[in-house]
Amino acid sequence: KTALLWFREDLRIADNAALSAASEYDAVVPVFIRTSGTKLRSNGAARDWWLHKSLEGLSRSLDELGAPLVLATGDPYVVLGDLAGKCDAGTILWNRRYGGAAAEFDEDLADRLTDDGFAVETFPGALLHDPGAIQTGSGKFYKVFTPFWKAVESVLELPDPISKPGKLSSPSSKPASEKLSDWNLLPSRPDWAGGLRETWTPGETGAHERLKTFLDGGISGYASGRDRPDGENTSRLSPHLAMGEITPAQIFRALDGASGKGSGSNEDQAVFRKEIGWREFGYHLLVHSPGIDAANFDDRFDDFPWKDATGDLHAWQKGMTGYPIVDAGMRELWQTGWMHNRVRMIVASFLTKHLLIHWKEGEEWFWDTLVDADAASNPSNWQWVAGSGADAAPYFRIFNPIIQGEKFDPGGIYVRKYVPEIAALPDKYIHHPWDAPEKVLVDADVTLGETYPEPIIDHKEARDRALSAFETIKDA
Ligand code: FAD
């Protein structure tokens, strides 16, 4: 008997329930489909870059196991039916996606394939806990993180690890594969991916190396250091998690194994687990509120007077707002495909509150440029910062980019790395160059408005403007 194994956001061999089930069949055909002709949201460019690299690794691993990966393009319903016919497979297996359009698509697909006579089996793995299975005492879903995470932790049982299968067999008639290089997932001209190549090692091996590095280092001091973009305390596991190269259960098991060996204090570990909990919460929200990537969770914001300000949006995207911490973040994103969480909050607040630009514009820019772009975490965090989300920061909490910079990058290390044109300014002015005396600017070779922009808006003015905008919807 032959099984088709459909890989999606689970590009790994270990701890892969669908792969393990497939290995029980006489023959397996692993497939990755470049989806087209459906309403599903396409990957952004940075994620496509990652996907290409990750598929190369997965392909090598599957070759070693004896069942080469087949690449195909199209509507999964058509492609899976066609491939199953070619290799005489009666069963189709996959690991589940949760919430939103992808989960709806998968459910509908499973029904159609079952109607066509296939056996469809699906498996968990991407999350610690089924996000639809957690409910409040009154049978509703959680809109606030802390009780949600308490509820998950109280029922959480880590599944046993699933080891990687031994040999797999290919069927005698095997469908042909498309060539990965023909998919054009990598940029050609201009090649914007140099910084990504320097920063990341996509794939399952890279994910486990990243986890090891973190457990040997960054986790110690994580609880206090995780907010510092000038440090190395966070794990940078997000793109690996987003592509399913590592599972949260593997991370939790590694933490259990590491405890007592000096890999972070209990507090460091608890805070880190909780951050992974935010990922689970994003999916919980997406399951119960599938439109969060397009619609305001708090519908008062449907009437918010957002501004249509293309020039400001471009300045923000390019890291040319004149606020060093904002510009450093936006340039880190462009250069490396990732941005530190604290700085994501600062730049998102700046876009939605200082510039009054709709969070959806920011969400889309992040979607295209983040290697960890995630269907649940991206919109839910954007809405959280904008004030329209579940458990959102109150609207009047408007980040002051100067104070945030001084607090979380006090020596200006982060700003100097990404905004080199002001690197020679003394620490005292690094987060607000416009206050520096002329002589200091001259000595540092900075001419505001020429070598580095003047602030595109005054902080106090922006704050007052945002609060008045909020007044118009507050009582709705
Ligand atoms: P660590 O601090 O090491 O945390 C470990 C893991 O916990 C992360 O890898 C991530 O999976 C999870 N996590 C941590 N914080 C959050 C959070 N606030 N929400 C959800 N999960 C979290 N994260 C994404 O994975 N994809 C996104 O598209 C994304 N978009 C964001 C947009 C905005 C506006 C903001 C403010 C945050 C966004 N985040 C997103 C959350 C967070 O910034 C990243 O998960 C984190 O910076 C990843 O770095 P890390 O792996 O070093 O995190």
Image (cartoon, grey):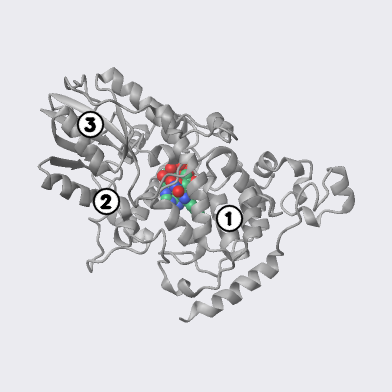
Callouts 2 and 3 close, C-beta under 8 Å? no
Callout in the foreground (2, 3): 2
* Residue at mark 3: 19
Rendered location of residue 271, percent (x, y): 43, 47
Comparing 322 with 88, the one in front is 88
Question: Does 461 sit above or below residue 222?
Answer: below
CA gap, disc 2 to disc 1? 34 Å
* Residue at mark 1: 346
Q: For label 1, count other residues whose C-alpha is less than 10 Å away and answer few (under 14), some (14-19) or many (20+).
A: many
Kind of element beneath mark 2: helix
Determine which of the numbered discs, if any, sits on residue 425 in the image.
none
CA gap, disc 1 to disc 3? 41 Å
Amino acid marked by disc 1: Ile
Callout in the foreground (2, 1): 2
Rendered location of residue 191, percent (x, y): 58, 33
CA gap, disc 2 to disc 3? 21 Å
**Could you say which quadrant of the image residue 472 lies in?**
bottom right
Amino acid marked by disc 2: Phe
Rendered location of residue 171, percent (x, y): 17, 22
User: Which tag, 1 or 3, sits closer to the chain's start?
Assistant: 3
Callout in the foreground (1, 3): 3
Residue shown at the point (65%, 42%) measured from the top left = 414
Question: Does 170 sit above or below residue 319?
Answer: above
* Residue at mark 2: 105
Whether residue 267 is visible, yes or no, is: no
Is 426 on the left or on the right of 195, as rendered? right
